[in-house]
Amino acid sequence: MSVRLNRRQFGGMVGGAAAASTLASVGAFAQAGDSVRLIWWGNPDRDRRTNEVIDLYMQKTGAEVVPETYGWGDYWQKLATQAAGRNLPDLIQMDYRFIFEYARRGQLAALDPFIGAQLELDDFDENQLASGRVDGSLYGVSLGANSMTHVYKKTILENLGVALPDPTSWTNDDFVAMGNELKGKLPEGMYFSQNMGSLEPRLEVWVRQRGKALYTDDGQLGYDLQDLQDFFAFWKDLQDQGLTPPADVQAQDASQKMEESMFVTGRSLFGFIHSNQLVANQNLVEEEIDITMIPNQDGGEPGQYLKPSMLMSMAESASNKEAAAELMNFFVTDPEANDILQIERGVSGDASIRERLIENLTDTETKIIDYLNVVATHVGALPPPPPKNAGELDRALRPAWDAIAFEQISVEDGAKDYYDNAVEILERA
């Protein structure tokens, strides 16, 4: 399916009003001799695009940019170490779940003083700007909107004559039934699905489908122990049925690098990604792939939501904040820069950039737009901001799940240990 949207439709899809606009002008560049450190979590495709934009910026301005990139699995520990050493890079690719934590610790600079000067955000969707605000101040500019997805190998499904159910209404029972139907028919070494028992975003969808949330507005757990037990039990059952890889195989993707995932390495037909990651995954997978909505629970509420795929923030310790703001502005509003970036980080919040890009999207990029069009009508509200110490809970989920997957502990005891630990972590936040 391919669609072409006008600007108003596109803006509506991501929830913002697309105001009349002109191409974003290029801001006053940093002077030669300025140096800005930029850090991001990446993948091979994102690294290539980001480095090309950096080269373009340095060529245009004579400024120096020092890049630094890591995989998601190493990124937050590296950033925490830099923060502890008061050595944060000037510009930081930031996740929605961590921006509140860093901002409230005083480690991020409020961007409001730069708006209208180095930061030209007149053409930016207000709802995407809102995702970067903490306690009324702007601490991050969205680099694009996206949503969670299940990614699958379309070519293999078509060759087997299997069609996906309606993505807006399929259930976990449909998902498991399809897995059992395909058991023994997939290429050697390929399982039906990546095991997602260790993925906090997948847990979040699970509890939201039950009308709950990961966290309440006042920073407590927003779900019950039984919800977590049921989540772990679901994925343990799929492992026991042979629909997901055994624990020792699944553990090989512990780095969370895209190129080492079960899906990319050919160990699973289905995987979990965010919609903006489709292009990078397709570049690493031989077969044609596509994305679909995450199956719901029987009678469940919408579990997914549109979110900023990532934001760009500035460290409070940045040595030259004006220079850092100029580079940030280049990434989010410069037409040539966004010709390189495209929608790899999600759908831009800048209306003029969206209008420019939509005419030249590839087939794979168009799948993302098609997907977000579907998701936009079946999503819930953006959840409350994660509380301080939420990152610790995310990091703790993987070992908690691994203990269950390797049968070192029962589902019930493993869930209770994690839940009790999570409550304690949040109480001392």
Image (cartoon, helix red, strand yellow):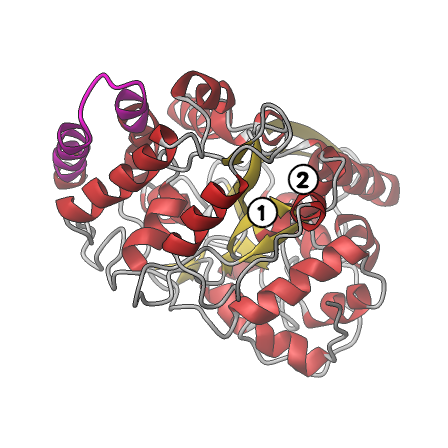
**Which residue: 84% across, 42% down?**
56
Q: CA distance from mark 2 to mark 1?
A: 9 Å
Q: Amino acid at mark 1?
A: Val
Q: Amino acid at mark 2?
A: Asn
422 part of magenta stretch? yes
Q: Is residue 172 left or right of residue 344?
A: left
Name the disc covering residue 281, or none.
2
Of the pair 4 and 16, the residue shown nearer to us: 4
Of the pair 258 and 141, the residue shown nearer to us: 258
Which range is magenta? Answer: 401-423
| Vertical placement of residue 331 versus 401, above or below | below
Q: Is residue 277 left or right of residue 193?
A: right
Q: Is there a contact, CB below 8 Å, between mark 2 and mark 1?
A: yes
* Percent position of residue 47, x then y: 71, 34
Q: Which residue, given by chain and number where applicable, does mark 1 sit on?
A: 151
377 part of magenta stretch? no
Q: Secondary structure at mark 2?
A: helix
Query: Which image quarter: residue 244?
Result: top left
Residue 301 seen: yes
The majority secondary structure of the magenta stretch comes to helix
Of the pair 198 and 104, the residue shown nearer to us: 198
* Percent position of residue 319, x then y: 57, 35
Q: Earlier in the sequence, mark 2 or mark 1?
A: 1
Q: Is residue 303 left or right of residue 272?
A: left
**Neighbours of disc 2 within 10 Å: few (<14), some (14-19), many (20+):** many
